[in-house]
Amino acid sequence: ASTFLDARLAGLYGLTLPPGAEGFARVELPPNSGRGSLLTTAAILAVTAHPNATSPTARGRYVRERLLCERVPDPPMNVPLNLEAGDSGVMPTLRDRLERHRRDPACAGCHSRTDPVGLGFEDFDAVGRRRTMEAGRPVDARGDLDGVAFVGARALGEILARDPRVAACVVRQVYRFATARLETDSEARVLADLEERFAARNYRFLELLVELVASEGFRTVADGGR
């Protein structure tokens, strides 16, 4: 796997640019980098975290909503969000605190869907830097996606690459972006056709864009049911 980095990103990733490289350059990712998919880019990792702490909930919600097109409800207004350490004197990890949080029935419904996925990102900190320790203990990056266990965000990316829900969701998200609105029930056939064409083109994103702008859904305007 490879990615494109400039000098500042290379420093964050702990990698070096090729000799003589200026600006962004293609860099091969070593097998032990923990990176290898869109999910392991600093941009995605940072935007799904708090300014000074990771957020397994936000990262898991990103996977559920943006890559699987599922709907995760917002938390109720009266749910306590305090995840501070207890009185034991031992600093718990974020995994420990979230497990306590999920014991609250008001929280468990949504957090049981987001947190097991997002905890697999714990080998990256809030800005997307690889880490091995948290609260003085080795990082535990075990995760679970609908019963499929994995360790680390790179492994999650490999699982999602084989999940047919992702390809269907990519089509749906691109269609929404191109039309600047949510799809309607009457456009199910257009989306299904785009999914078939995307698969026939070996899931090449540029091919999907060509098929999209040539599709009936993009070229015609619905009358709103009138």
Image (cartoon, grey):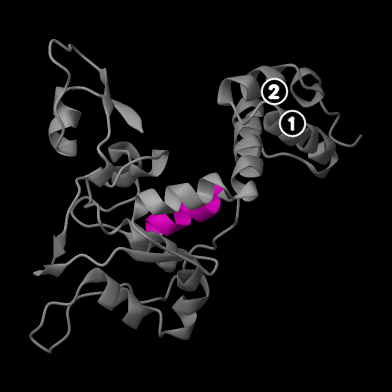
Q: Looking at the image, tell me whether mark 1 or mark 2 is earlier in sequence order.
A: 1
Whether the magenta-drawn stretch holds residue 66 is answered as yes
Whether residue 37 sits left or right of residue 18 in the image: it is right
Q: Is residue 66 visible?
A: no
Q: Secondary structure at mark 2?
A: helix
- Give the residue drawn at x 69%, y 23%: 212
Image height of 200 relative to 185, above or below: above
Q: Label 2 is placed on what type of residue?
A: Leu
* For the residues bearing labels 1 and 2, Cβ distance under 8 angstroms: yes
- Would residue 63 appear left or right of 86 to someone viewing this image? right
**Residue 195: in magenta span:** no
Which of 42/224 is in front?
Answer: 42
Residue ID at (77%, 18%):
219
Residue at 12% over, 33% down: 11
Which residue position holds label 2?
Answer: 212
Q: Position of residue 198 (x, y in %)?
A: 68, 30
Q: Quadrant of the rendered structure where residue 122 is?
A: bottom left
- The residue that disc 1 covers is 194
Does residue 56 lie above or below 209 as drawn?
Answer: below
Main secondary structure of the magenta stretch:
helix
Report the front residue among 175 and 155: 155
In what quadrant of the picture does the N terminus appear?
top left
> Which residues make up the magenta segment?
58-67
* Residue 216 % position (x, y): 81, 22
Marks 1 and 2 sit apart, C-alpha to C-alpha, by: 7 Å
Q: Amino acid at mark 1?
A: Leu
